[in-house]
Amino acid sequence: MAKNKWFGTDGVRGVANVFPITADFAMKLAMAAAEKICNKKHKVAIARDTRISGQMLEAALSAGFAAKGVDVLLLGVIPTPAVTTVTPDLDVDMSVMITASHNPYKDNGIKLIAADGYKFNDDLTAELEFLIEKGEFVFDSNKIGSIRKDNSALEKYEAIALSTAGEKNQLQGLKIVVDCANGCFAEIMPKLFSEMGADVVKIGCDPDGFNINRDCGSQHVDAMLDKVKKVKADIGVAVDGDGDRIKVCNEKGELIRSEQLIAFLAKYLQESGELKSSPVVSTVLSNTGLEKFVLNNLGLKYYSTPVGERYVVEKMRQEKGVVGGEESGHIVLSDYSRSGDAMMVALVLAKGLKFYKKKMSEIFPLFEFEPLVFENPRFESREKVRSIVANSELQNVLAQCQMRLQGVGRAVIHPSGTEPLIRVWVCGNNECLVNEISKILLDKIEELR
C-alpha cells in the first residue's frame, strides 16, 4: 500500500493558512483530483462545516476544479455523513468535505469522498500527492467549469433521516439533551428529534465560525453531562463539528463508552428483528470485552480492524456488517449511512430506549470492560511520530509484548492520523500484565524521543 505524506486516515488536516491547509494547496489538490478522478461526469460536490476558514478553502477548491473544466456544486454547511449518504444521488465523480471534525476552529481539513459515498484508498491519495508535487497542470481555455449552489443534498438527507425514524411521534415522552458542538448538526438534529416527538434541550447550536467544538460537543462533554442532570433528561447526546462522532450519557449524567453503545445497537437491532446474523466490526483499540460480549452473548461474528473509520467501513462492506465503530465515537450503521453518523446513531439509540422501556442506567453497562491502559504521548510533529513508530527497536519490543499477550489481550502502537500523538493501547484479562506491558512500551518510546 502506498505511503502518504499529507493524507492521514481521514484526509489532509492541519492549521488553516499553514501548509498544507492553504488556499494554494487546496487549489492544486482540486486540479490533481480533476485530472485523476473527475473524468467521467466532470462534476464535483463541495461541502463544509461551520469554521471560518471553510469558505476560503471552498473558494480555492472551487477555483481549482473549475480551472480544469469540472463543474462544482456548492452544498454549503452540511454534516459529513449527509455528504457520504447523498453523494451517490448527486451525479458527481466525487465529493469534498472541508472539515477538521472534532478539532478547534483554527484547524481545518479536506476529506475526499468517492462517487459511491465511500472514502478513497491510500494508493489513490498517494497518486494525487504525486501530481501536486509534480505541479505540471495543463489548462484549456475552452474547458472552464461552472460553480453553483445546490441545496438539495441537505433536503435529501433530512428526508432519509425522517424515513428512517419511522412513525412521527414514536419518541414522545423522551427528554433528550442535544449538544451539536456549534457545528453542522446545529439546526437539523434538534429539528429532527422535535419532529419525532421528543422534548429537546439544545446546547452548542449557535455557530459563529469560531466556536465550533469550543467547550462543547463530543470532545468537551461536561456541559452535556451537567445539563442532563439539571433538566432531568433521559439521555444526553454530544456530537462533533462535522457530525460523524458521538458521545452519549445516561439520565444520571454518566458517560457511556462507545464499545457499550456498539454492543447495545447490535443487541437492539437483533432483538427487534432488524439484524439477523450480521457480524459486528470494530478496531484493534476497542476493549476486548466488546469482542467477548458479541461472540458469547449475541452469538455473532466479530471482526477487528486497523485504526480508522475507513477500515471499519471496508470490513463491514466485505462481511455485510450492519453495526461497527471505533472507541473514539465513530459508529457506523450501514443500513442508514456509509460513514459514522451521529444523528442516525442517536436516533436508533433513542428508538432502542423506547423498545426496552427502561432507563439507560438500567441497561448499561452490557458487559464488563477488561483492564486497559491507553496513553497518548505527544511529540513536536507528525513526522517525528512516524519516525518513532517505524523504529525497528520499538517494533521488536512490540512484537515481544504481543507474544506475551497472545490469547489473553492485545497491544497496539498507532500514530494518530490527525495529531502528533502516538497512541499506546494495551488491554487484556490480567491487569498486572497489562500494566507491565504498557510501561515497557511507553519507556521505549520515551527512550527514542
Image: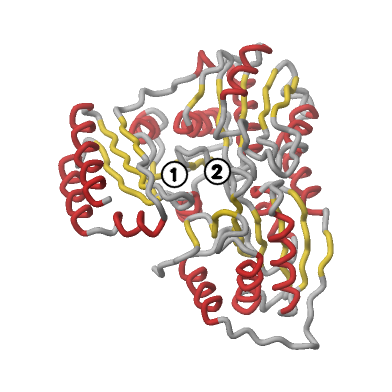
Query: What is the C-alpha distance between the residues marked 2 and 1?
Result: 9 Å
Place residue 31 in its image quadrant. Answer: bottom right
Place of residue 410 in the rendered image (x, y in percent of width and height, measured from the top left)? 27, 41
**Picture layout, residue 378 above or below residue 237:** below
- What number of labels is visible? 2
Q: Is residue 319 visible?
A: no
Q: Amino acid at mark 2?
A: Val
Q: Is residue 275 above or below residue 14?
A: above
Name the kind of residue labelled 1 in the image.
Val
Residue at 75%, 62% in the rendered image: 90
Judged left or right of residue 8, residue 402 is left
Q: Is there a contact, CB below 8 Å, between mark 2 and mark 1?
A: no
Q: Residue at x 69, y 42 (%)?
A: 210
Q: Quadrant of the N terminus?
A: bottom left
Q: Nearer the viewer, residue 162 or 287?
A: 287
Using the image as rendered, state which of residue 26 and residue 326 is in the foreground.
26
Under tag 1, what secondary structure?
A: strand
Q: Quadrant of residue 368?
A: top left
Q: Position of residue 445 (x, y in %)?
A: 25, 47
Q: Residues within 10 Å of mark 2 (few under 14, many from 20)?
A: many
Q: Position of residue 2 (x, y in %)?
A: 41, 70
Which percent across, then down, holds residue 192?
A: 76, 33
The numbered mark, 2 or 1, whose residue comes first in the sequence reads 1
Q: Give the image quarter of residue 299.
A: top left
Q: Secondary structure at mark 2?
A: strand
Residue 281's disc number: 1
The colour style of the image is secondary structure
Assess disc 1: are there few (<14), some (14-19) or many (≥20) residues with their C-alpha within 10 Å of its C-alpha: many
Q: Which residue is mark 2?
A: 332
